[in-house]
Image (cartoon, rainbow, N blue to C red):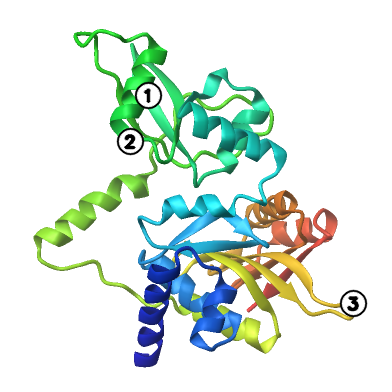
């Protein structure tokens, strides 16, 4: 345990020195395999010591420290034409009104999450989504938004702008007019403040589910390309390489720590795999529900389910 903590401290120092890094770079720096490097990075991300990018390099996200966000601009070479167009337009204009964009542009803005910050702006009882270039200062953004809304005089009613919740990808539908804050988001801040007042920090628990997955991957010679902890000790997304007779095959892997995996769990994982254009592997500590078994047999032949 002590050695693992030392390695994580070393990883933080490497990121501080080099900027955003890939798991393969960390594995070389600390002299371990990519599986263990990914596990350490996942722990550091879960404890919020490191941040994880949405932009990918070779299918893998980058890990970085708060304040290193501008460095992510160096890794946009894999953007498709639509994402590149959205990136270039927003970097020049600084603020875009969501409802004024073409459907394709709205989709692209939701894909470049590292660089496009959604803001819910309420004015005259109407709510509009504005996209802010991530390096635009808040005061500058407010001036531009006021201009776009036609608020030029200081005595005019002030607008209310707040950071929007993460927006789900669109296909050809307009953006929702209101994005509600989840109950978990609402509760998180009061709980943390209460703990601070009582003089203690939130206790960090070891992710035992992640440790079990690492053992499973190692036993089956599965390599991790990227990972994202969706919910600690409960749900993790991976892109993995699985050995086969024709060489290593990439899979999108959804791992869930729950007693019973539902048909909804399978269909959600299947859709995500389709978006990534990868076959799907679902790992679960529990059994499949009867509806999930029926769906797996009839509709999701390209999805593989494994109980761990």
Label 3: state its secondary structure: loop
Who is closer to the viewer here, 170 or 142? 142
**Classed neighbour count for the residue bearing mark 2: other residues with Cα under 10 Å, few (<14), some (14–19), many (≥20):** few
Whichever of labels 1 and 3 marks the residue nearer the N terminus, that label is 1
Q: Which residue is mark 1?
A: 121
Question: Is residue 83 placed above or below 12 in the rendered structure?
Answer: above
Which residue of the protein is positioned furthest toward the left in this rendering? 198
Numbered circle sitting on residue 246: 3
Q: Nearer the viewer, mark 1 or mark 2?
A: 2
Write down the quadrant of residue 247 in the picture. Answer: bottom right
The image shows residue 86 at horizontal and vertical percentages of: 60, 34
What whole-number distance in Å separates the C-alpha atoms at marks 2 and 3? Answer: 51 Å
Residue at left offset 10%, top offset 59%: 197
What whole-number distance in Å separates the C-alpha atoms at marks 1 and 3? Answer: 53 Å
The quadrant of the rendering that contains the N terminus is bottom left
Residue at left offset 64%, top offset 81%: 217
Q: Nearer the viewer, mark 2 or mark 3?
A: 2
The image shows residue 291 at horizontal and vertical percentages of: 71, 56
Who is closer to the viewer here, 303 or 63? 63
Numbered circle sitting on residue 157: none
Write down the quadrant of residue 180 in the picture. Answer: top left
Label 2: state its secondary structure: loop
**Classed neighbour count for the residue bearing mark 1: other residues with Cα under 10 Å, few (<14), some (14–19), many (≥20):** many
Q: Which residue is mark 2?
A: 137
Who is closer to the viewer here, 171 or 267? 171
Whichever of labels 2 and 3 marks the residue nearer the N terminus, that label is 2
Question: Is residue 226 placed above or below 123 in the rendered structure?
Answer: below
Which residue of the protein is positioned furthest toward the right in this rendering? 246
- Is residue 301 found left or right of 67 in the rendered image? right
Residue at left offset 78%, top offset 60%: 296
What whole-number distance in Å separates the C-alpha atoms at marks 1 and 2? Answer: 16 Å
Q: Tell me, yes or no, if residue 27 can be seen here.
A: yes
């Amino acid at each position: 345990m002590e050695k693992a903590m030392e390695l994580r401290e070393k990883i933080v120092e490497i990121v501080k020195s080099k900027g955003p890094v890939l798991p393969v770079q960390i594995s070389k720096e600390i002299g371990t395999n990519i599986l263990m490097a990914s596990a350490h990075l996942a722990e550091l991300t879960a404890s919020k010591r490191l941040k994880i990018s949405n932009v990918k390099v070779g299918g893998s996200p980058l890990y970085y420290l708060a304040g290193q966000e501008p460095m992510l601009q160096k890794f946009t070479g894999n953007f498709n034409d639509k994402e590149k167009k959205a990136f270039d337009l927003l970097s020049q204009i600084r603020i875009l009104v969501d409802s004024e964009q073409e459907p394709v542009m709205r989709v692209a803005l939701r894909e470049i999450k590292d660089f496009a910050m959604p803001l819910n702006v309420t004015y005259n009882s109407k709510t509009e989504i504005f996209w802010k270039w991530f390096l635009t200062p808040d005061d500058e953004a407010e001036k531009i938004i006021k201009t776009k809304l036609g608020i030029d005089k200081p005595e005019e009613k002030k607008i209310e702008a707040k950071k929007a919740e993460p927006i789900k990808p669109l296909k050809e539908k307009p953006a929702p007019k209101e994005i509600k804050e989840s109950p978990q988001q609402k509760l998180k801040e009061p709980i943390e403040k209460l703990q601070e007042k009582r003089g203690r920090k939130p206790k960090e628990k070891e992710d035992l589910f992640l440790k079990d997955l690492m053992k499973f991957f190692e036993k089956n010679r599965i390599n991790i390309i990227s990972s994202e902890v969706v919910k600690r000790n409960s749900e993790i997304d991976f892109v993995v390489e699985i050995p086969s007779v024709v060489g290593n095959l990439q899979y999108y892997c959804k791992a869930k720590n729950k007693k019973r995996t539902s048909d909804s769990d399978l269909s959600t994982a299947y859709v995500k795999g389709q978006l990534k254009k990868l076959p799907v592997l679902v790992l679960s500590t529990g059994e499949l529900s009867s509806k999930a078994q029926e769906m797996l047999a009839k509709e999701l032949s390209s999805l593989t389910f494994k109980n761990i």
